[in-house]
Amino acid sequence: MQGQKIYKPKPVSGFHEWLPEIRSVELQWLKHIARVFESYGFTNIETPCAEELDVLQSKGEIDKEIYTLTRLQAADDDSGSRLGLRFDQTVPLARFVGQHFNDLDFPFKRYQMQKVWRGERPQLGRSREFYQCDIDVINVDHLPLHFDAEMPAVVYDALQGLGLGKIQIRISNRKILLGYLDALSIDDPVSVTRTVDKLDKLELAEIHKILVEESNLSTELSTKILDLVQTNDIASVRAENEQMEEGLSELQFVLDNLSHLPENVITPDLSIVRGLDYYTGTVYETRLLDVPEFTSSICSGGRYDDLAGRFITRNLPGVGISIGFTRLFNVLYHHNYIQSSRTTPTDVLIALMDEDDRALAGETAHKLRARGMNVEVYHLPQKLKKQMGYADKKGIPYVWFLPNQDKNVHEVKNMKTQDQSETTPDTFHLDNDAREPALKVASS
Amino acid sequence: MQGQKIYKPKPVSGFHEWLPEIRSVELQWLKHIARVFESYGFTNIETPCAEELDVLQSKGEIDKEIYTLTRLQAADDDSGSRLGLRFDQTVPLARFVGQHFNDLDFPFKRYQMQKVWRGERPQLGRSREFYQCDIDVINVDHLPLHFDAEMPAVVYDALQGLGLGKIQIRISNRKILLGYLDALSIDDPVSVTRTVDKLDKLELAEIHKILVEESNLSTELSTKILDLVQTNDIASVRAENEQMEEGLSELQFVLDNLSHLPENVITPDLSIVRGLDYYTGTVYETRLLDVPEFTSSICSGGRYDDLAGRFITRNLPGVGISIGFTRLFNVLYHHNYIQSSRTTPTDVLIALMDEDDRALAGETAHKLRARGMNVEVYHLPQKLKKQMGYADKKGIPYVWFLPNQDKNVHEVKNMKTQDQSETTPDTFHLDNDAREPALKVASS
């Protein structure tokens, strides 16, 4: 359209998009994670992007991060309800369970992998639009502790399959530290747990200083607390009261039920408390040991007593864990752990050397598709070099040659090995690794 | 949380969500459609939910349907750019191609299956948040006509696999009618095509009346035009000028290249013009012949000359087609074509009769998962009746019994047939139909 003014588009800050080659990796990862979630019987839900502001505003602190929706030209007939984009998947889950309580089967095991939005200042590892991959189990009145042990098992399968190297899942139980603080008659346990929560970001001496100066602890008390949370041998920890005892025995139960996982994957770590106050028992964090660029948790969660108290007068305890997918993916990409040169899902490009071959090309493609392969017929009978160049540029692993005057057989060329051999549409098989995008991720 | 005020959540008008049993069908449909798109070599992209308003407002008419985003407590440091939710996937595609032109390989075959948002008044078949499933092929300067024939082939595979009964894809080429109107020296061809576009909603006599009264056509001219668009035999249509000739020959080319599809799937229909002015050649609409509740197209599209002229000074012709997924799904659901009683992806529930069996249950589950099955271990050693009831309620197709004191073998019960038989974790196979959610869709 000549004469029209060109509007040069630019990225919107904090809203990310990928080129096809990287999106193909992201899509493969998301599919794998969903596969693992389903293999443990978690069922998928999707909630609308928007909730009523009254639903979203149960957690006052994050008000300023919420995006609200307005119709550009709102008419008089518009209903008065104000809507905002979800900023996590937990509030929508609580609303969903409250609203549909009578139509759900409990224990309700759900997974949810949608984008969430927060109007924060964007930086590496913090976007305004990002995927989270959540699993939660909710039950009525009582939720068996076995589910607390299921969460890390699922997460291990999910992350391990992505080839991210050594995974470490750290587990604690908030009752241990909270019980200890109670036994020590600490006035403001919340401020102490918030400080302890910073142990992976600050030096020990600094944490000690904050505990003494800001929480007004004696040096002795601060040392005692820091000794506890740094204990590696939880069997040696003595319970000072019932709450602590309960926490220790729950943690031991969870650890015992994870003994089938490879050594060193599961690590008890009493310094894990999670900032959020609604966790009441088991808590999790997850580290990638082979990716030094990651110093904080990529997957966290825990047990809570009451999911949906705001929405329903039923007691609904739950346990859940969440992979911060976009943050994980963006940081790995930024540090060159993720590379891919395949810009198409096409497995086989059928070369078209003559317009008369088009019907046979179509039939051949149809047969291969019926056998599960992704197939393109090159669109025009151009020079072979041009067609090979197309396959090469898009990272298509095989080029197929139809029978011709010289040779009455089908042939296929493996673009990686450059081997070319006879084949038929009924017998051809992809190499096992032909489907994978070319990844380079951390490995030990 | 006692004493707290209960907020009773209610659905937000126009924003839909499904219970797990229906979501499982929706998810299966979306996966199938994506599989088919990839089998033809379309690569996936996702764009952010929000675009700058300057990008969205290229089509002035739909301003009032756009949702804008505002941070609830926007701070002074906020950038001035105003954002709105996408209302289709074509504008974001144009922006994406314009922005990333140098990083894309052409012909660029992309599919996109995201939600879009329009602030319209909700009604059956019209939501404020809905999925569209789009494929488009974009090329630089010239796009071979073969791609116009590929669109209906892909759509046929996608829809046919959903078991929706008889599918009819109607095809025309806008050059035929526009050329004819030009040959007849019609002053206002746009108003005539808009009226002809209503042929599936209004009686022929009424269309005739509108053409005569509103477009000021003579009775003779109106009759001529309506004769043309009702022709079944396009071979009998005589080209009155070059444009018409081109349209007829392009349409014939597309039809010839679709001859491999089953009889009666493809129907030339010169009354198809599509309201949107940017289509310049081939146009498509799709009907479900076995679903009388659908009188309009469920999947439409066409050829356009210039995708991204607003964003880049390159000529980028394309052809695309879009399945109005949520509308299709909602209407079928509303008319009871979609039913499912399976609220979980779990294929096998391992019954737990004794706490001591937990390790063996876990091992068995692990083996079955490694073989691709979705497996839950029942969470507590409760009465068998309770465990069977759980499987029944959630629609789990198999219940597994571990070896016990009486019998040293694994057994599995098919919940549909009630057959119970010996098995092993290494040899058990699901019945072919065990994975499918229970669907009841139209069939001929």
Image (spheres, coloured by chain):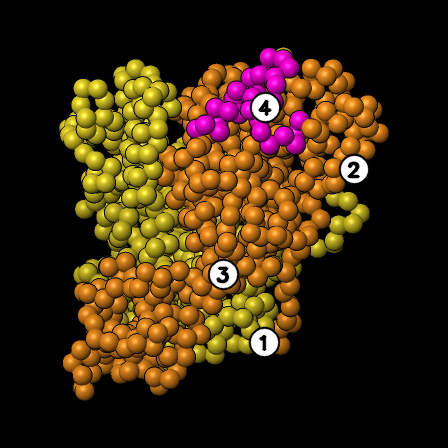
Chain colours: A yellow, B orange
- Does the magenta-highlighted stretch encompass residue B246? yes
- Disc 4 designates what residue? B236
The label shown at residue B206 is 2
CA–CA distance between discs 2 and 1?
58 Å
Q: Is residue B49 above or below residue A383?
A: below
| Percent of width and height locating residue A420 | 16, 27
Question: Which numbered disc flags the more N-terminal residue, 4 or 3?
Answer: 4
Q: Nearer the viewer, mark 2 or mark 4?
A: 4
The label shown at residue B440 is 3
Q: Amino acid at mark 2?
A: Glu
Tag 2 subunit? B
Tag 4 subunit? B
Q: Nearer the viewer, mark 4 or mark 3?
A: 4
Q: Identify the image quadrant of residue B345.
A: bottom left
- Does the magenta-highlighted stretch encompass residue A14? no
| Percent of width and height locating residue A230 | 28, 63
**Residue drawn at x 52%, y 22% as measured from the top left:** B250
Image position of B297 (left or right of A394): right
Task: Please say whether residue B241 is visible from this viewpoint.
Answer: yes
Q: Amino acid at mark 3?
A: Lys
What's drawn in magenta, residue-wise?
Answer: B228-257
Mark 1, other Cα within 10 Å: few <14 / some 14–19 / many ≥20? some
- Disc 1 designates what residue? A313
CA–CA distance between discs 3 and 2?
38 Å
Q: Is residue B177 above or below residue A252?
A: above
Q: Is residue B290 above or below residue B76?
A: below
CA–CA distance between discs 4 and 3?
42 Å
* Whether marks 4 and 3 lie on the same chain: yes
Mark 3, other Cα within 10 Å: few <14 / some 14–19 / many ≥20? some
Label 4 close to label 3 by CB (< 8 Å)? no
Q: Nearer the viewer, mark 2 or mark 1?
A: 2
| Percent of width and height locating residue A106 | 46, 73
